[in-house]
Image: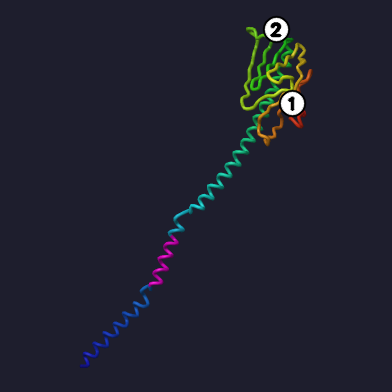
Amino acid sequence: MKKMETQQIRVQANFKKSSDMTHRGAPTQAAEKFISISKQDTMKAQAGFTLVELMIVVGIIGIVLAIATMNFKQWNDKYTVESYTKEIYSILMRARNDAANTNTQVRVALAANLVTTHQDADGDGVVDAGEPTTTKSYPSFALNSTVLGGLPTTIIFDRRGMTGNQQTLSVTGYSPNASPGVDCIVVAATRINIGVMTGGACVQQ
């Protein structure tokens, strides 16, 4: 009888110990739910950008590229206009000097996008065999002249390096905000000056 009572007490003790371990060690249903939600949040955080975030980044990149493109065009226009103006100025100065130094007439024909220099040895206005001729092209922007009738026109330097074809030449068609340092040339009877158009006049630089 005592032996049976002892066994019964041991069974009850083991059952209580097992119940206590289950209560303390096993996760409850609420804890399991919390762990599941935490895992989901972690996976979302590691997944990358959302669509809204991606659209914002793309928009910012587009704005930056637009500003950079606009600034590059203005810089390119400024550089090209200044380069054209200085080169045409050099052509005219060389033609004037060649006329005086070689005692020959030199003609500079101007079109919207072309400048042709012709050393007219016999002064007949015709390009004869053996007479040096040089043509330069300016495709990006157009030349303009204040001479009556505009372009095309011809500036003729006589044997003394003087001309009666006085006028102002300018490079046109560039971006309003390019602000080139030089964009025009004033051709007078005895001198040639380079400058920038200001208020409709070529101001010498």
Question: Label 2 belongs to which residue?
Answer: 124
Percent across and percent down for residue 43 are: 43, 59
Looking at the image, residue 179 sits to the left or right of residue 36; the answer is: right
Which residue is at the front of the view, 147 or 43? 147
> What residue do we see at 35% from left, 80% from top?
20
Res. 194 mark: 1
Eye-nearest disc, 1 or 2: 2
Kind of residue indicated by mark 2: Asp
Please state, as top left, top right, bottom left or bottom right, where the N terminus lies in the image.
bottom left
- Which quadrant of the view contains residue 172? top right
Segment colored magenta: 29-42
Q: Secondary structure at mark 1?
A: strand
Asked which secondary structure carries label 2, the reply is loop
Q: Residue at x 64, y 32 (%)?
A: 77
Magenta stretch: dominant SS?
A: helix
The question of residue 149 being in magenta is answered with no
- Quarter of the view holding residue 18: bottom left
Numbered marks: total:
2
- The kind of residue on which mark 1 rests is Ile
Query: How far is mark 1 from mark 2, CA to CA?
Result: 30 Å
